[in-house]
Amino acid sequence: MGSSSVLSDDDYDVISNPGTRSMENSVIFGETVRELPASEDAQDRFETTRWNASEIQAYVRKGLNLPPSTTFDNKRVKIYVDGSFDLFDVGQALQLRQAKLAFPSVYLIVGVFSDDILQQNNSKSTWPEVERLELVRHCRWVDEVSKDAPWEVTLQFMNDKGIDFVAIDEGSSVDPTCDKARVKAYDELKQNGKIIKTRRTVGLASQRSRAIASPSQRATPTLTSPPDAPDFTTHVDVYGLGY
């Protein structure tokens, strides 16, 4: 391999967090992690590629209504994301990125539904469980892959696993493809302050066949951003109002 094909430090974006602590990703705690920058085309197409850790954390804090005095600098937050991860796409990868960067230090667990669970709930998959698990394992943001993930996440499950928050895409509660039993379980978690929202990546090829919400169906932001927080009010997810 020639020297011209090797990326130098200048070719990477350092994922920095507020303060002096840097994000970790399957490395020693506190060690700097580097991320290849998104291409200009990707940044033009997908808003979620442009957000850095500070912007993602500001959005999460706003969604949780956390006072400015609340800090997680000395705590490793355990976050859980689940799904079938069949035909793993850019939107799912960017959701995992948001979950991983939601706090200064995050341990990200990804639960993958088994073939049996999917069949029991009338959900189909293109790829078998073993391949879907292996695919998720190779995502750079993931710290742990959990097989046989439950279809409905409960407070008991979170307590047993030591999970602090469950990350779900905004709009899931009104997504017609999201199972009603799972939405009901999310409702209970939300009432207990255990849900953090990630912004859905729009403009993907896989979404072209989905209906776009009309202006009257779209969410009207009701939260006021802190002075240093990015303005997310111009972004409207394709499913309209929902968490």
Image (spheres, grey):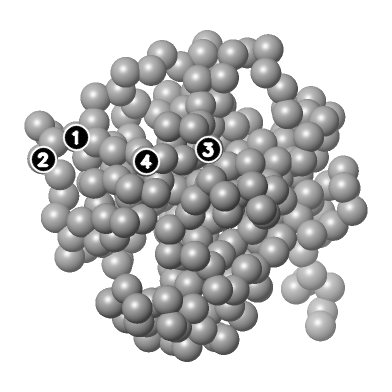
Nearer to the camera, 137 or 187 = 187
Mark 3–mark 4 Cα distance, whole angstroms, equals 10 Å
Residue 180 in the figure: left or right of residue 18: left
Residue at 65%, 68% in the rendered image: 145
Residue type, numbered disc 4 = Asp
Mark 1–mark 2 Cα distance, whole angstroms, equals 7 Å
Assign a secondary structure to mark 1. Answer: loop
Label 3 or label 2, whichever comes before in sequence order: 3
Mark 4–mark 1 Cα distance, whole angstroms, equals 20 Å
Front tag of 1 and 3: 3
Residue at image mark 3: 194
Residue 61 in the figure: left or right of residue 161: left
Residue 144 in the figure: left or right of residue 114: right
Residue at 50%, 61% in the rendered image: 82
Assign a secondary structure to mark 2. Answer: loop
Front tag of 3 and 2: 3
Residue at image mark 1: 218
Q: Which mark is residue 96?
A: none
Q: Kindly tell me whether residue 131 is visible in this rendering.
A: yes
Say if mark 1 contacts mark 2, CB within 8 Å.
Answer: yes
Label 4 or label 1, whichever comes before in sequence order: 4
Nearer to the camera, 179 or 28 = 179
Residue at image mark 2: 214
